[in-house]
């Protein structure tokens, strides 16, 4: 099956996945019982927008990810991270109820896919990468006292490290650097526009996810360009 056809099929699957993911995110947030502040209801425009974005991300997976059997894992990864982006933007939360089981399923799919594709070395690298990204974010969380970098972001780093390092060490490094670079630029923009103050918690999950997406697609080329 051609990459173009796979991309079309992935996009078709991504639209309903994104719609359901956005609605599920809203339900999880609404059912939380330990909120310190009230979470506003999800606007009606969010599910269709997330559906379109998820379809676009799904379409890119077959174009930028090598291997046949790992494609379901990367599609699941894309769907999971899109849902977590929704919750983080809406409520500045990475719910364990979504992240923990989602990451477990993602890791299992990646393991099976890697074995079938003959990518055993990639699994070892992915596991080390997940731990490395976790250590980096945990250190920042501890140093910052959790003010600008939340515990949910630390937990999110595991699945991001897993799926970027599977492709290569340079992709993992690019994901980390891009995540913090995009997050820093977004943070400064919010401060300058006065949409956030230094006392506010910044949703760092979306920049981390975007950094991982860009790294998976262009990380190798970016690192090669930087080292020249």
Image: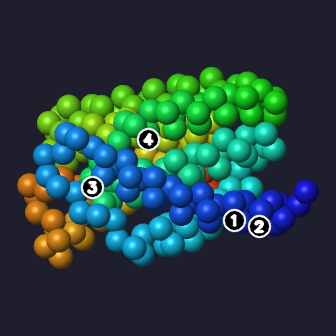
How far apart in space, not on screen, are marks 4 and 2 (Cα)?
Answer: 27 Å
Q: Residues within 10 Å of mark 2 (few under 14, many from 20)?
A: some
Residue at (66% x, 34% y) in the render: 110
- Whether label 2 touches label 3, CB < 8 Å: no
Q: Which comes sooner in the sequence, label 1 or label 4?
A: 1
Q: Residues within 10 Å of mark 1 (few under 14, many from 20)?
A: many
In what element is the residue under mark 1? helix
Quadrant in which residue 51 is drawn: bottom right
Residue found farthest to the right: 1
Query: Is residue 219 in view from this perspective?
Result: no
Label of residue 57 in the image: none
Front residue of 176 and 65: 65
Residue at (81% x, 44% y) in the render: 68
Could you say where residue 23 lies in the image, as x and y percent from the top left? Answer: 45, 59
Q: Nearer the viewer, mark 4 or mark 2?
A: 4
Q: How is the image coloured?
A: rainbow
In what element is the residue under mark 2? helix
Residue bearing the label numbered 1 = 11
Quadrant in which residue 5 is drawn: bottom right
Q: Which comes sooner in the sequence, label 3 or label 1?
A: 1
Q: Residues within 10 Å of mark 3 (few under 14, many from 20)?
A: many
| Left/right of residue 48 with respect to residue 218 in the rendered view | left
| Left/right of residue 191 with respect to residue 26 in the rendered view | left
Residue at (50% x, 55% y) in the render: 21
Residue bearing the label numbered 3 = 91
Could you say where residue 171 lies in the image, as x and y percent from the top left? Answer: 57, 45
Front residue of 73 and 227: 73
Could you say where residue 55 lies in the image, as x and y percent from the top left? Answer: 62, 65
Residue bearing the label numbered 2 = 8
Label of residue 98 in the image: 4
Could you say where residue 158 lies in the image, as x and y percent from the top left? Answer: 45, 34
């Amino acid at each position: 099956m051609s990459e173009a056809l796979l991309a079309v099929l992935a996009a078709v699957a991504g639209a309903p996945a994104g719609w359901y993911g956005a609605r599920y995110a809203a339900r999880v947030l609404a059912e939380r019982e330990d909120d310190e502040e009230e979470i506003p209801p999800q606007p009606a425009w969010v599910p269709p927008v997330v559906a379109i974005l998820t379809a676009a991300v799904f379409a890119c997976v077959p174009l930028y990810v090598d291997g046949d059997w790992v494609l379901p894992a990367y599609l699941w990864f894309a769907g999971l991270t899109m849902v977590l982006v929704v919750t983080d933007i809406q409520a500045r939360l990475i719910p364990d109820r979504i992240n923990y089981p989602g990451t477990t399923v993602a890791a299992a799919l990646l393991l099976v896919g890697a074995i079938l594709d003959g990518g055993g070395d990639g699994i070892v690298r992915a596991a080390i990468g997940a731990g490395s990204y976790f250590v980096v974010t945990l250190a920042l969380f501890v140093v910052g006292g959790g003010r600008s970098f939340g515990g949910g972001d630390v937990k999110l780093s595991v699945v991001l490290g897993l799926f970027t390092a599977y492709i290569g060490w340079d992709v993992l490094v690019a994901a980390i650097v891009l995540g913090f670079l995009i997050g820093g630029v977004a943070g400064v923009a919010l401060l300058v526009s006065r949409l956030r103050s230094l006392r506010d918690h910044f949703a760092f999950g979306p920049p981390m996810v975007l950094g991982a997406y860009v790294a998976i697609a262009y990380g190798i080329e970016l690192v090669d360009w930087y080292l020249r």
